[in-house]
Amino acid sequence: MGDGLLTIDGEFHRRSRRIMLPAFHRERLLASADAVIEETTRAVEQLRPGARVDVYAWTRHLAVRVAMRALFGVDPDGEQARAIDAAALFEEALSFYASDYFLRMLRTKRSPWARMQRAARTLDTLIYSEIKRRRASGERGADILSLLLDAEDEDGNTLSDLQIRDEVMTLLFAGHDTTTSTVSFMFYELARHPQVAARLLAEQDALLEDGRPTGAQLLAGELPELEMVLEETLRKYPPAWVGPRRAVEQFEFQGHTVPARAFVNYCSWASHHLPDVFPEPEAFRPERFAPAAPELPKGAYVPFGGGSRTCIGMRFGQLEVRTIATLILSHVTLSLPEDFRLSIRQMPTISPKHGLPMLVRPRAGVTAAPVPMAA
């Protein structure tokens, strides 16, 4: 990923973040919503009742297409994208993290590391050629790449081609894997809690016209039942489950002295499962996040990090997950095979270790009114 926002710190991080922030302002995200809805609609229409689908793989493919269009303005069906097959390359690169730990240390020509490097170089070809083409032609769109090309901070600093490449690759990775795992775990839990799914369907029938959400509705999170389900999914399965940091200065923690510059990891998976903060932490209970629920302690719920390192793409990720969930629910019902047992992989993000096979059925009817949101 290079030196993108995920891997840099200090003044370089602050300056880069200031330059990039306008790309994630509300009006820009709203302009991207149409592309997200269009790509998701296209993918959902391919889900036929009676079929069996790996929701994890299906969402991964969709997330790459959304990223190429909404984030980078590249037509995923265009000649260049077809020739390079960015989706397959990205899968090849990410497969490094699914390989055996010992194999990851090897640097031979056929090692997982070598495959990842080859895939990254080919992806670079796509990204750099698009940067070069845009700079030469002056062509700009509503995508984030266009904004990065022209972005500058208050001192007039701009991003080099290498910096833009690194940020593009970082956003592609962060948006691709986190969205995929969140959608997968959400539908895993909905299949196990039909009463929660029924509330979502009733909400859709009450608030959406013909089951079609608008970009403004999705960006603002105007489906409260869906918001609670999304937040509870992120609590139980935070995609970025661990974060490496370094102590800025010496401090005391629980009777221990942590020296300055010491490496420190925080683990959102652990904090999200503390029973004194979240009673019955293994239970899936969206009502934890009802408007009337007690306020959580600071730092107890951090699916997108916190402080100056809160994920810059948080709102885009939420928009994408809401869109995918809403359109799937309005089109079909997904159920689990009786013999499926979830196994979780924790590298690089939390995800279903063996995918998420689900059975596609016609959309279920709503048999009950929404249950009032509990405190």
Image: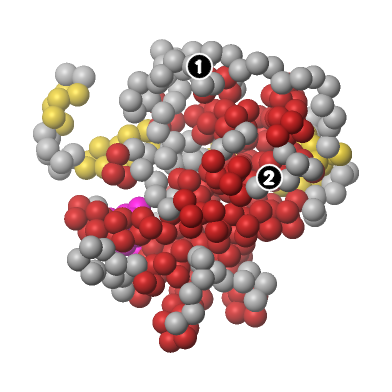
- Which region is colored magenta? 1-8
Q: Alpha-carbon neighbours of circle 2 within 10 Å: few (<14), some, or many (≥20)?
A: many
Residue 369: image x %, image y %? 76, 20
Mark 1 near mark 2, Cβ–Cβ under 8 Å?
Answer: no
Q: Nearer the viewer, residue 374 or 333?
A: 374
Q: With respect to residue 152, does 288 lie above or below?
A: above
Three-letter amino acid code of the residue under disc 1? Ala
Asked if residue 267 lies left or right of residue 64, the reply is: left
> Could you give the CA–CA distance between mark 1 and mark 2, rounded to whole angstroms?
25 Å
Q: Nearer the viewer, residue 283 or 161?
A: 161
Of helix, strand and loop, which one carries label 2? loop
Q: Where residue 234 sits: x, y (%)? A: 51, 34
Disc 1 residue crowd, few under 14, some 14–19, many 20+, Cα 10 Å:
few
Q: Which residue is mark 1?
A: 292
Using the image, determine if residue 225 lies above or below residue 276. below
Q: Is residue 308 above or below residue 224?
A: below
Q: Is residue 257 left or right of residue 60?
A: left
Amino acid type at image mark 2:
Pro
What kind of element bears circle 1? loop
Is residue 38 at least partly visible in the picture?
A: yes
Quarter location, residue 300: top left
Please state the horizontal and vertical placement of residue 149, each as a whole percent of the image. 39, 72
Residue 5 lies in magenta, yes or no? yes
The dominant secondary structure in magenta is loop
Q: Which residue is mark 2?
A: 213
- Please report whichever mark, 1 or 2, sits nearer to the chain's N-terminal start: 2
At x 54%, y 21%, the residue is: 290
Identify the residue at image location x=12%, y=38%: 249
Please tell me which residue is depicted at 73% across the width and 54% down the height of the picture: 41
Depth check: give the residue in front, 162 or 349: 162
Name which residue lies at 74% across and 57% down: 42
Which residue of the protein is positioned furthest toward the bottom in this rendering?
136
